[in-house]
Amino acid sequence: MDSFLQNLINGIGIGSIYALIALGYTMVYGILKLINFAHSDVFMVGAFMGYYGARIFSKLMHGSEVVEPGWPLFTLVLLFSVACCGLLGYLNERIAYRPLRNAPRIASLITAIGLSFLLEYGGQMVFGPDPKFFPQLLEKHQLQFLGTSITSHTVIVLVVALIFMGILQYIVYGTKFGRAMRAVSHNFETAALMGIPTDRVISITFVIGSMLAAVGGVLYGLSYSKIEPLMGIMLGLKAFVAAVLGGIGNVPGAVIGGLVIGIVESFAGASPLSTYKDAIAFVILILILLFRPSGIFGKYQAEKV
Amino acid sequence: MTVTAVLEAKGVSIRFGGLTAVCDFNLAIQPTELVGLIGPNGAGKTTVFNMLTGVYKPTEGEIRVSGVNTRTLKAFDITKLGAARTFQNIRVFKSLSLLDNVKIGGHIHYKYSWADSVLHSITFREHERQAEKEALELLSMFDLDHRAHDEAKSLPYGDQRRLEIARALAAKPKLLLLDEPAAGLNTGETTELMQQIRAIRDKFGIAVLLIEHNMELVMGICERILVLNYGKTIAHGRPEEIQRNPVVIEAYLGEAVEV
Amino acid sequence: MRNWLVRDLAGIAVISAVLVGISYFLGWIPIPGMAYYNRVIVTIGINIILAVSLNIINGHAGQFSMGHAGFMAVGAYTSAYLTYFHFQPFLATLAEGPGRFALQQALFLGALLAGGAAAGIAGWVVGLPSLRLRGDYLAIVTLGFGEIIRVLILNIDKIGGARGLSGVPAFANFFWVYFFVCIVIIVSWRLVRSQVGRAFLAVREDEIAAEAMGVNTTHYKVQAFVIGSFFAGIAGGLLGHYLVYLNPGMFQFTKSFEAIVMVVLGGMGSISGSVLAAVILTVALEGLRFVKEAFGLTSDPRMVIYAIVLILLMRLRPQGLLGNRELGDFFRRRKGGDR
């Protein structure tokens, strides 16, 4: 049963990263009814900001670009990446999406696709197309757990991801801003009439989503160590599937969806079907959309005639 | 009865969640009848329409169009049975020409495949010739033929409503369902439209079910009127009877007081 | 009296004769580097087929498909499988001569049509369940299907898997590519001016009103999908037999994206717009190749340019170059003046 537990733990590891990305998709979709294709590339930028941040802070802290693992460095790098991506998310919304608020939906969708490619291939030009090795920000230990060995990184990924999801949950359901956000997502026009500054709410939603993606990016770098400019494409698509699986617009749903996809993939990867691993998320997507288009936790809404 | 009713609704109800939007709705329309369905705002008129045309499925009860139970049918199947409709909030095909709008209205009568279209077969040519002729006739009936090649969205509001009626007539229905055709029109246009509806009925010999918010308007042209309030049928009869019915008066006056 | 069929066959004969004439002429022009220009011209043709066929789905029927490369891959591999494993060995047993040449052309046409049919069937399988979905979900599902198809091909060892399939017979040429360019344009042109095409347009404009007019919207969406996929399959077959090589990496979703950019740039729903955009973008792409070399860039700038074009287009001219009109409409308008 060791391998069972091992696969489960690996699945939870990648699943929590899917979940962090899925949250950004689900929040933006909830408010703007837009699949923000560029979101997964913000995740990629987050990973690269972690990569460059680690060198910058190492240089500042002890005058050398050689990274010495440690919690202070990790925290600084994480915050740096989160700040950069928050800004990127803000700019994306402000420059690309806001001018199209009253345009047909298809225009926003195409812009999202365009923005996504701009970040991916712009990233190739700026960061270089070759994979980079993410520095070891924290020392890696092997832990014994119920007879299987897991790395400390897996635990850290899970804990950090949970902390940020908790913060998000609090923001959405426990603060005045969260209430405004839910109101905008429920009915855009009415919320505006009630005096909610919808543009600001949307901006902040993009910023929060992008920050979570940055956390995901740094954690991904930490546990998989190889990052490259196109890595957001596949991960992002799977994260989107996770958001749909959980019921799009639903915060806890996105987290559970992410974990489910991660775990299923992890088990598939260890089975004879391993070469089909990348297709599994899409098969799941198609099955959900056919049998339960509202996702696990969502509500189905018919179009009004 | 020897003649099949074009429309027959028996004990039709629909619930959305806990809310009963329409309760125990009964109506039979004979060929060439002109029936009005009236009621204050939110009485459930459009919901009834959406059930009759297959957009919603009733929770209870049975609807027959030309004698066929529509329970398992889709909206487009019901159109094929001979019921064509217009929409309260105009739904013309905005960026298509008037001519194409009306030709799509006749969709169910022009039967040829994609292969015929690609090869320009004889079937294709015959049907297309007929489609063109019929569409132009209908457009000229509504004085729209001189704009046949313009985009529908370039028409003024009232003309878009008339285009929608022309499009529905292209389906050669036995029953024409009009959802507030006079909404947004001024008094003069409304009177003209009502005369036109009556003329359509006489010319094509079809039945018409007309939803109207304003009671006065339908009195002049309908032979029979059904009044809905809060999803319930509160009166059903000839216009004179409806006009005198205290329950109806109260429903309308009551609404006026509330507003 | 099937004179319409006679007329169409005569039309095809004329088109073929003209294309043969042009291809001889192209082969005869004594410019240095003509082979290169030939290659660009063929690439333009393949892209026109892709753009015009995607326009049937995205522009006419209004269904946002992002899986065109997947259908292209199905067509490419199906036709290459037939020619590589069956037709080519068979032809090799025959003596050289006009008979073999004619047979080779016929078999190639058959292989292309089989590839198109396989892609069309794939389009049907994908379309039937997913076309009930709303626009943006459809986009993601078609994208997912495209990826599934690619992963499947990666796992079929017989056709090369991840290594790719090299040695695909070099059957495709200027003639065949532009023959199908003509076919796809005529088919799409005639379709949109028929009841079938009007049903596509009605679905795009307003599904609820279309259903109320007796249009079975799912049926027509699937039909548009199948026809579009068929031609994507043909384009794939032509590409494989022109490049003499196939690799699953050629059909990543960047390829679908290229086709989308062409359709959007040309104006969704405009056939001539798609053609125009395919020409402009392919030529621009070749230009960018020089830019890349001149500046010594390590990565290809074309996707960045595509992306910027798309974003700016949505800001400045979301209806594309021609909107939903055709080139001819503009001339007609100028002649007749506004009514």
Image: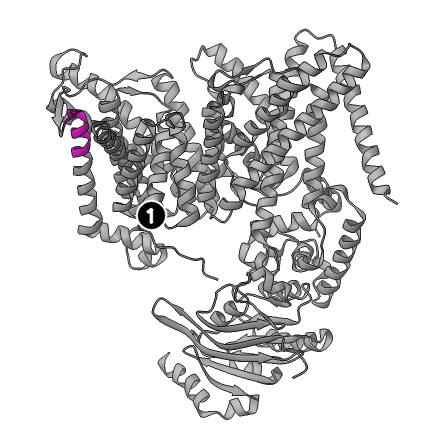
Q: Is residue A264 above or below residue B31?
A: above
Q: Decide: is B156 above or below C186.
A: below
**Percent x, y of residue A142:** 14, 21
Residue A148 colored magenta? yes
- The residue sitting at the front extreme is A1
Is-magenta flag for residue C92? Answer: no
C92 with respect to C237 (left or right): right
**Residue C279 seen in the figure:** no
Q: Amino acid at mark 1?
A: Gly
User: Which residues are drawn in magenta?
Assistant: A147-160
Question: Which SS does the magenta portion mostly show?
Answer: helix
Find the residue positioned furthest to the right. Answer: C1
Q: Position of residue B73 (x, y in %)?
A: 55, 62
Q: Chain of mark 1?
A: A
Classify residue B168 by image quadrant: bottom right
Identify the image quadrant of residue B146: bottom right
Residue C150 visible in this rendered orientation of the protein: yes
Viewer-proximal residue, B187 or C213?
C213
Describe residue B87's horizontal placement relative to residue A74 as left or right.
right
Residue B204, given in percent of the width and then of the height, sits at 72, 73
Quadrant location of the C terminus of chain B in the rendered image: bottom left
Front-most of A281 and B210? A281
Compared with residue C39, is residue B102 higher up or lower down, i.e. above or below? Answer: below
